[in-house]
Amino acid sequence: RRVLFRSELPPGTTLQPGMAGYESLLKTQNGWLLGFDRGEFGGSLWFVDASGKATQLSQENVHGLVETSRGVMILVGLAHMSFDSGRVLIARYPITADTHLETLAPLDGAPETFTKLPPDGAVVVTTHGIFRITSSGAHQALTHSKFALLYPNSVVSTDRKSTRLNSSHANIS
């Protein structure tokens, strides 16, 4: 996740109120998905069409976008003080300004980091565990542990089904 710079927006896009914070960006068949995370100050998900017209799809903090054959999985949530919540949404194809977001899977806390898994899923690290999630909605807890204070920043999953989590404070295999 990174901060969005105005020059990186799709051509013709006007910056809208709520388009601020850490940014997730994904080009789709019909435009772009732009996700924003401003922590306790809110977040948002926007669809931007080819002309640059932006439509807000959600007001949740977006932590990541994962492209699959069934649609785009959207990792949303917030961990702030005693509040800690997360879930995985899906925007099914074709994605447009009228796209309805569905809850694909609950999470036990806010998403921290993720990696795409072939063919159609992701490993998601939350503040409380590691999950494998597929675009069909199947989800499996791989482990439960308090990761919130480790500030995980990357996760790798190998063909041997092992997972390695890296953070600013520890490396866990």
Image (cartoon, grey):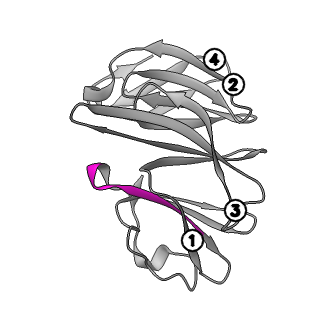
Magenta: main secondary structure equals strand
Residue shown at 72% from the left, 44% from the top: 68
Q: Circle 1 sits on which residue?
A: 55
Viewer-nearest residue: 36 or 163: 36
Q: Report, in whole angstroms, how far the alpha carbon at label 1 lies from the one at label 3.
A: 14 Å
Q: Circle 4 sits on which residue?
A: 161
Magenta region: 40-47
Q: Circle 3 — which element? A: loop
Q: Amino acid at mark 1?
A: Thr
- Mark 3 or mark 2, which has the lower sequence index? 3
Q: Circle 2 sits on which residue?
A: 138
- Mark 1 or mark 2, which has the lower sequence index? 1
Q: Report, in whole angstroms, how far the alpha carbon at label 1 lies from the one at label 2.
A: 29 Å
Between disc 3 and disc 2, the foreground one is 2
| Residue sticking out furthest to the left | 81
Q: Circle 1 — which element? A: strand
Q: Amino acid at mark 4?
A: Lys
